[in-house]
Amino acid sequence: MPYLAKTLLYPVKSLDGVEVEQAKILASGALESDREFAIFDEQGRFVNGKRVGKTHLIRSQFDILNRTISLQTPKQESPRVFHLDEQQLEIADSLSDFLGFAVTLGRNSALGFPDDTNSPGPTVISTATLTEVASWFPGLNVDQMRRRIRANIEIDGVPAFWEDQLFTQQGNIVSLRVGDISLFGVNPCQRCIVPTRNPDSGEAYPNFQKIFVQQRQATLPNWVDSSYFNHFYRLSVNTRLTPAETGKTFQLGDEIDIIT
């Protein structure tokens, strides 16, 4: 039986994630505390791994219950702990000092800062998919691939690319039932430059995107409508939720099924 094996939140967009046992759904369909905060430069642009390679060198740990973040950069001998609600200026100052330019910490508690604002639900992937994709790259393991892909919901008890059934055929509505929660698959998530890089050092894996595209195309399940793939640098599923799911909670171990 497919089941919810991991739930990961990324309280500050582009920084490290935190594994949680349960996650609450907001009215927007986003997960509470996921990408709730983001780092911005003086021009109002995101400061993330896509644009600023040094972002990969920032280590963070989160205490979701107590609303704290522990930050450490290569300039610091030990981490510093800040309150996410009460010390946003201090967090920004610490990050500015390391990055070498002024940044601010923005917050959106209703929607967060998802890459796809039209599909702000949790991104979905399976453990088998992460394991398979990691096998394409000698030296990488499933945990390293998990940190590169940064999905929210991880399903176990299924074969690789099982989640691709969520967009089987254009025009069909396919939902994923997780416990008593229904998610609607929208499209396969387009990846950026971040998965090509070591999440700790920012060092690029040689020919990562080329290898990924070749292998993704070669292993695409025969049940998938290939019209979703204008290119094959896509992995995990973007989702939406209806307002009826507001306030419900994903729980580790929830049974999962696909409903067409």
Image (spheres, rainbow, N blue to C red):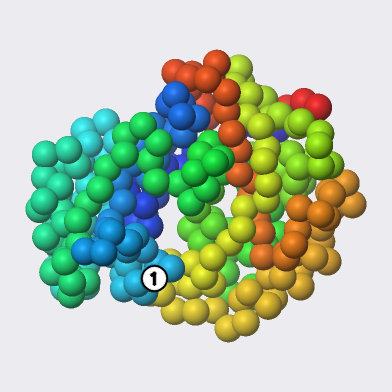
- Structural crowding at the residue carrying mark 1, measured as other residues with C-alpha within 10 Å and reported as few (<14), some (14–19) or many (≥20): few
Q: Nearer the viewer, residue 199 or 13?
A: 13
Residue drawn at 65 percent across, 56 percent down? 235
Q: In the shown orientation, is residue 229 left or right of residue 18? A: right
Q: Which residue is mark 1?
A: 51
| The quarter of the displayed image where residue 260 is located | top right
Q: Nearer the viewer, residue 186 or 56?
A: 186
**Farthest residue, direction bottom:** 206
Q: Nearer the viewer, residue 230 or 100?
A: 230
- Residue 94 location in percent, x, y? 13, 61
Quadrant of the drawing holding the N terminus: top right
> Count of labels shown?
1
Where 147 sits versus 127, above or below? below
Where 97 sits versus 10, above or below? below
- Residue 89 location in percent, x, y? 11, 51
What is the three-letter code of the residue carrying label 1?
Answer: Arg
Q: In the shown orientation, is residue 260 left or right of residue 3? A: right
Residue drawn at 69 percent across, 76 percent down? 211
Where 259 sits versus 62, above or below? above
Residue drawn at 36 percent across, 32 percent down? 110
- Residue 142 location in percent, x, y? 58, 58
